[in-house]
Image (cartoon, grey):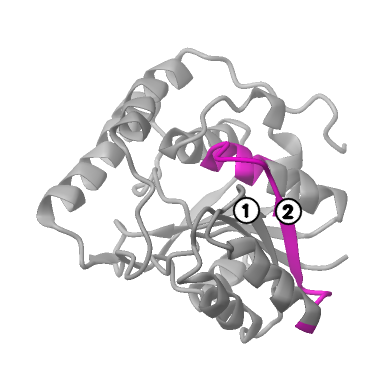
Amino acid sequence: MVESLVIIPTYNEIENIQRMLDSVMDLEPPFHVLIVDDGSPDGTADVVKTAQKQNPERIHLLERSGKLGLGTAYIAGFRWALERKYELVYEMDCDFSHTPQDLVRLREACKSGADVAVGSRYVSGGKVSNWPLGRILMSYFASVYVNTILWLGVRDSTAGFKCYRADVLDRIDLNRIRFIGYAFQIEMKYNAHRLGFRIVEVPITFADREFGTSKMSMNIFREAFLGVLQMRFRPIRPNPNAKK
């Protein structure tokens, strides 16, 4: 079994993709990467294809037609990873808001007993860099809101930098995941929590992107706000086809 796969969704990340691939390839122990590209018109996928020629065993590409949403990109990546029997599966942004070197720390947390390791801005040692105060407050109180409604117990409930053990993804019924924006990140944690998996937060520094354009929109924020209420009253059922 190959151990670690990092899933990175992309749309117009030409300024970041090569540097990101180089950074992950330099890590020890080795990580594999799956780029899920939603038809980037700027040539992001072409850069990945060129990098694949240099490292075909560790760099992989899944191309999709058009912007289909963050959540569906990750679910496609999760299925790809489970089919190939990866032990640890990671979520990470391509814009360097997540530090690639912190993948090692998330791995260590799962190797030490966590079922899900979350790169957290809001636990001791975690912080946010280069964000305006208004955005920090909105993000922080969004997590307070999530925990008030869902009793999730994760201080950075909207975090998108995570490591899952493969059995967590196998047991979550991915066909029942409904949200595609930041609500997707909450929904996945909530499913893991309700199914009895252990979630551990690892402090990280989250930095605003230097290059490219943010994908955040008011529609994504609205989905997250209303989605939490829907999650609260929607039953959580395990994947009926999960391995026993």
Above or below, 113 against 78 in this view is: below
Question: Gap between marks 1 and 2, in whole Å?
Answer: 6 Å
Above or below for 141 versus 46: above
218 sits to left or right of 237: left
Inspect the image, locate mark 1, and give the three-letter code of the amino acid beneath it.
Answer: Asp
Q: Position of residue 103 (x, y in %)?
A: 55, 71
The residue furthest top is: 233
For this rendering, which residue is in front, 143 or 174? 174
Q: Position of residue 60 (x, y in %)?
A: 75, 64
Instruction: Say whether marks 1 and 2 touch (CB < 8 Å).
Output: yes
Is any part of residue 157 visible from this angle?
yes
Which residue: 38% across, 68% down? 204
Residue at 71%, 76% in the rendered image: 50
Asked where in the image residue 236 lies, by quadrant, the reply is top right
Residue type at the position of mark 2: Leu
Which quarter of the rendered picture does the C terminus lie within? top right
Q: Is residue 173 visible?
A: no
Magenta stretch in the rendered image: 54-75
Q: Is residue 65 magenta?
A: yes
The image shows residue 158, relative to residue 129, as above or below, that is above
Q: Nearer the viewer, residue 154 or 96?
A: 96
Provide the residue designation for mark 1: 37
Dot 1: within a 10 Å radius of its alpha carbon, few (fewer than 14), some, or many (20 or more) residues? many
Quadrant placement of the N terminus: bottom right
**Which residue in the structure is indicated by mark 2?**
62
